[in-house]
């Protein structure tokens, strides 16, 4: 093997399969039932009930901003939506930089 050559034995022979991301996110809102808070799920979530109704992404974020609404951790709604909702929360402008 030449000095510049790289051994490829450590790389898998087959590339990893790519997990397909949806072309468009679709969300479901399950209303409050039996003392449980309203919950936002990703479309197709096995934890969503048949009473859940569809939401767009902005609607899902608006609903999650309300107290008492949660995002599902089973389907990844929490992993996707909560960071978006929290973005910029730590950045409070100083009094001199307010519009």
Image: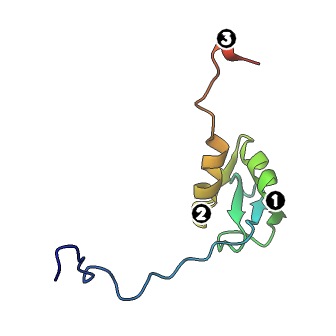
Numbered badge on residue 56: 1
Left or right of 6 in this view: 72: right
Q: Nearer the viewer, residue 54 or 3?
A: 3
Query: SS class of the residue under badge 1?
Result: loop
Q: Earlier in the sequence, mark 3 or mark 1?
A: 1
The residue at the point 64 percent across, 60 percent down is: 77
Q: Quadrant of residue 14?
A: bottom left
Q: CA distance from mark 3 to mark 1?
A: 37 Å
Q: Residue 80 lies in what quarter of the image? A: bottom right
Which residue: 73% across, 42% down?
Answer: 65
Q: Measured from the top left, where is residue 34 in percent x and y?
A: 72, 57
Mark 1 packing: few (<14 Cα in 10 Å), some, or many (20+)? few
C-alpha separation, residue under disc 3 versus residue under disc 2: 39 Å
Quick one: SS at disc 3?
helix
Q: Secondary structure at mark 2?
A: loop
* Residue that badge 2 annotates: 76
Mark 3 closeness class: few <14, some 14–19, many ≥20 residues within 10 Å = few
Reply above or below: 41 against 61: below
């Amino acid at each position: 093997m030449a000095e510049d050559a790289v051994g490829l034995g450590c790389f898998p022979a087959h590339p990893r399969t790519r997990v397909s991301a949806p072309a468009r996110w679709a969300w479901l809102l399950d209303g409050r039932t039996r003392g449980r808070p309203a919950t936002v799920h990703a479309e197709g979530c096995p934890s969503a009930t048949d009473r859940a109704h569809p939401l767009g992404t902005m609607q899902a974020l608006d609903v999650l901003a309300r107290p008492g609404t949660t995002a599902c951790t089973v389907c990844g709604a929490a992993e996707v939506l909560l960071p978006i909702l929290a973005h910029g929360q730590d950045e409070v402008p100083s009094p001199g930089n307010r519009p």
